Structure formats: C-alpha cells, structure tokens
Amino acid sequence: MPRSPDATSLKLAERLSTSVGVGVVQSNRAISPSLHEIVLHGVSSLAGVPGNDVMLEVTHEGRPVRRRYSIRSVDRDADTLTLWITTHHDGAGATLARTVAVGTELDVVGPRGKIGLHELADWHLFVGDVASLAAFYRLAESIEPPGRAIFIVEIDDPADAVTPSLPEGLGVTGVFVDRDGRPRGSADGLLSGLAAFAFPPDDGHAYLFGEFGAMNTIRHALLDRGLRDEDISLKAFWRAGSANADHGEPDKTP
C-alpha cells in the first residue's frame, strides 16, 4: 500500500478545498525530444474534468516545492492518470520527469484549475506551446462531433508534433510552428500561425495556454479579430525570466 500524504499536502488540499492522494509512478518514458509521459497509479479520482490539472510535490534546490501539470488522460478502471511534462529546460518538474523511477510515490493534490470545455461553441481554437498539448488534447477529445478543433502550437523540434486520435466526425486542423531560434516566451511564431488562419463561421472559443506575456499578446490579437473576452480562456503556465513560485504558479503581476 502507498504511504499516506505528508502533513503539508493534507493542509494544502484542505486550504484549497480539494483532494490529495499518493500516486505511484507506473511508467515514465520520453515521447518526444521535449516531452516525457508519466503514468501515475492510485490517483485517478483526482483527475477532474478535461482542462483540469494536478499539483505534484517535487524537490528544488533541496527543498519541496509544488508544480502543476495538465492531465493528458485518465483511466478510471485502471486507476491511472497520465501527465505530459516538458523537459527542454532545467526546472524542478523537468528534472523529475527525466529521472523519476517506476515505483516512486508522489504526493498529488487535485483536481485544480477552472478552465473547461465551452460545450456550446461550434469551434475550439487551441493556441500555446508544447507544454499545452496534454490539456489541449484532453479537451479536444471531449468535443462532441461535428464540432471543430484547431491547434496552433509552437514546438522546438519536429518530433514534438505529437498527434492524438480524436473522435470520428470531429473537424481537425493542426498547425505546428517551429520556434526556429526565437526566444522562449516570444509570441511572434504563434502570431504568424494565427495570422494565416481564417476563423470558421458561427461561435468559437479560444484556449490560450503557455507563457504569461505571449498568451496575453495572443489574447489581444484575438480581441482585435473580433472575439470577445468571454470567448477566450487563458492559462499561464510560466513566465519568461522568472521561476514559478513554490506553489507552482508564475508571477501574474501586469
């Protein structure tokens, strides 16, 4: 049997009015140059709905910190949830993803997050960096046909263009933009991909997941093209030039 969550995890879950458990690493493998897939057993009840994430306790500079990761998929029968974690940097979570061994027990707090699928939208536009793929694909898998999913995602390597199997009858457009040496956090590549894309008719919703400044730039570009604030959901995973706080969130000061 896995151990019990530590006292700080229990207190955190209570403060956040959510749940906590101990996930056992069932598998860990690289699925692209920038992504590792980690499957955790025993915590499928924490997966929430598409768009939700979980918070893991990891070690950074010899002390415990929290990092949040979007859930790629959940198998409630097998009691597993799957995470895709980026490894193209030297952060605490990337180090965990590269090195964590099968059988390791990790405190997991969740579900977290407020962004879910806008079911009344006719089309769904997903814009972000490679760290967004897990959330985007889980959200897209919950779209009812004949809805439409459009992906504009910046990648560091052609092999990072990992694609899912989406429901039959769903209209899918995928645009993978090569970062091509641009600084991480620049919105230029995503803006070029967005400029080449014509919005479908009817009602759409945009989901912007990625670097704080870049996603806000994309948001303004979408507003200029006619979307309303309520048509846009934005989640900043990180902020260029600063590490995430111990609770896993980037500084969101304007």
Image: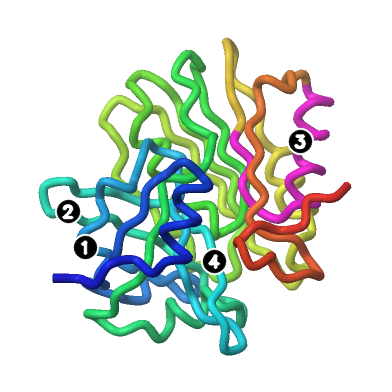
Range of magenta residues: 207-225
Quadrant for the N terminus in the image: bottom left
x and y percentages locating residue 180 in the rendered image: 71, 69
Q: Amino acid at mark 4?
A: Arg
Query: Judging from the image, what secondary structure is the residue with disc 2 in?
Result: loop
Tell me how far mark 1 sits from mark 4, CA to CA: 19 Å
Q: Are marks 3 and 1 in contact (CB under 8 Å)?
A: no
Q: Is residue 2 above or below residue 194?
A: below
Q: Amino acid at mark 3?
A: Arg
Where does label 1 land, which residue?
Answer: 41
Q: Are marks 2 and 1 in contact (CB under 8 Å)?
A: yes
Where does label 4 land, which residue?
Answer: 66
Where does label 3 land, which residue?
Answer: 219
Where does label 2 land, which residue?
Answer: 79
x and y percentages locating residue 127 in the rendered image: 62, 43
Tell me how far mark 3 sits from mark 1, CA to CA: 37 Å
Q: Is residue 18 above or below residue 226?
A: below
Name the residue: 61% across, 61% down: 247
Q: Earlier in the sequence, mark 2 or mark 4?
A: 4
